[in-house]
């Protein structure tokens, strides 16, 4: 099948426009969810992860897509990560252990991602064991679920940032930076120049919002640039995920948000002076 016919099969039929539109829409959704509350924010992050789970599987030895169901493993692991992020006391330890005040988590944490990874791997393995023998392409299928799920779990950083001391400003800055960088990323051959201007505009937005919130303006600008760099990396990952757009649209739309997650969380903590 030719490249033109393959691109015509892309969702919405808009291989060049749909991914950035979806990315900007999801970034805006995260801001609105943060305004609504932490539970709604957790649901929005889970939606981002499920969009990523919709990415088509790669071809196996027979050139047919490998059997790699991703929705259930990613949903389960994402739910575990969200629960631990919102209620870190669930992993306080066995009976007899003592959690001191200094060890308590009151500013968000990415510990839930580490706990959710084994859940992801186990769910992916069980999904393969349910297949009838001889189970061709088990290794590529497992790799597809685990790698995609790991990228999806990185989006938990947005939720962790939302429950940190400067959650709302950090999420707003991250969403604004994401939109700026994603739009600049469509510049084609002028992409490097567009990235420079996008990072400069991102720094300006971070400085302005930090000043409005009474935080250190320089720290706000540096944090915004770091988030912009993560979004650029996510966009690059999305473009290289599969050879043709129909096979990578979900990753191309969500990878910028997912890869920015841990950076958003760290930037929020630095911004708060923690």
Image (tube, rainbow, N blue to C red):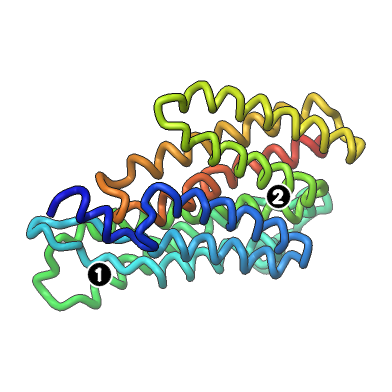
Q: Which numbered mark, 1 or 2, is in the foreground of this view?
A: 2
Image quadrant in which the N terminus is located? bottom left
Instruction: Pinpoint residue 89: horizontal percent, then vertical percent.
Output: 71, 64
Can you identify the residue that label 1 sits on? 128
Figure quadrant of residue 237: top left
Looking at the image, which is closer to me, 65 or 248? 248
46 vs 24, nearest the viewer: 24
Residue drawn at 25 percent across, 70 percent down: 128
Residue shown at 48%/70% (left/top)? 76
Q: Would you name the residue on which mark 2 appears? A: 161
Horizontal arrangement in the rendering, residue 228 relative to residue 254 (left or right): right
Question: Is residue 138 placed above or below 208 in the rendered structure?
Answer: below
Q: Which mark is residue 159?
A: none
SS at badge 2: helix
Image quarter for residue 47?
bottom right
Quarter holding residue 38: bottom right
Kindly identify the residue that appears in the image at 54 percent across and 41 percent down: 182
Q: Quadrant of the C terminus?
A: top right
Dot 1 and dot 2 residues touching (CB under 8 Å)? no
Q: Is residue 167 left or right of residue 62?
A: right
First-in-chain label (1 vs 2): 1
Q: Position of residue 269 (x, y in %)?
A: 75, 40
Pointer 1: residues within 10 angstroms few (<14), some, or many (20+)? many
Looking at the image, which residue is at 44% across and 65% down?
74
CA distance separating discs 1 and 2:
34 Å
Residue 241 seen in render: yes
Position of residue 104 measured from the top left corner of the image (x, y, whole percent): 77, 54
Where is residue 127? Give x, y as percent: 30, 72
Could you tell me if residue 265 is visible in this image?
no
Q: Residues within 10 Å of mark 2 (few under 14, many from 20)?
A: many
């Amino acid at each position: 099948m030719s490249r033109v016919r393959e691109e015509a099969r892309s969702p919405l039929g808009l291989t060049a426009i749909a991914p950035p539109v979806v990315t900007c829409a999801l970034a805006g959704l995260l801001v609105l969810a943060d305004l609504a509350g932490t539970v709604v924010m957790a649901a929005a992050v889970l939606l981002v992860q499920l969009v990523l789970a919709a990415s088509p599987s790669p071809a196996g030895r027979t050139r047919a897509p490998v059997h790699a169901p991703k929705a259930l493993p990613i949903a389960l692991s994402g739910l575990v990560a969200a629960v631990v992020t919102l209620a870190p006391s669930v992993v306080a330890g066995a009976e007899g252990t003592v959690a001191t005040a200094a060890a308590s988590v009151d500013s968000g944490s990415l510990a839930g991602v580490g706990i959710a990874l084994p859940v992801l791997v186990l769910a992916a393995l069980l999904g393969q064991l349910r297949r009838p023998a001889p189970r061709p392409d088990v290794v590529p299928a497992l790799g597809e679920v685990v790698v995609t799920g790991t990228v999806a779990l990185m989006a938990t950083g947005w939720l962790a940032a939302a429950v940190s001391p400067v959650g709302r400003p950090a999420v707003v800055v991250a969403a604004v930076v994401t939109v700026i960088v994603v739009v600049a990323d469509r510049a084609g051959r002028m992409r490097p120049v567009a990235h420079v201007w996008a990072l400069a505009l991102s720094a300006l937005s971070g400085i302005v919002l930090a000043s409005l919130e009474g935080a250190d303006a320089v720290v706000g600008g540096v944090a915004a640039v770091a988030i912009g760099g993560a979004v650029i990396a996510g966009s690059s990952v999305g473009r290289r995920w599969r050879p043709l757009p129909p096979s990578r649209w979900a990753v191309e739309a969500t990878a910028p948000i997912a890869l920015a997650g841990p950076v958003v969380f760290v930037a929020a903590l630095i911004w708060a002076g923690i």
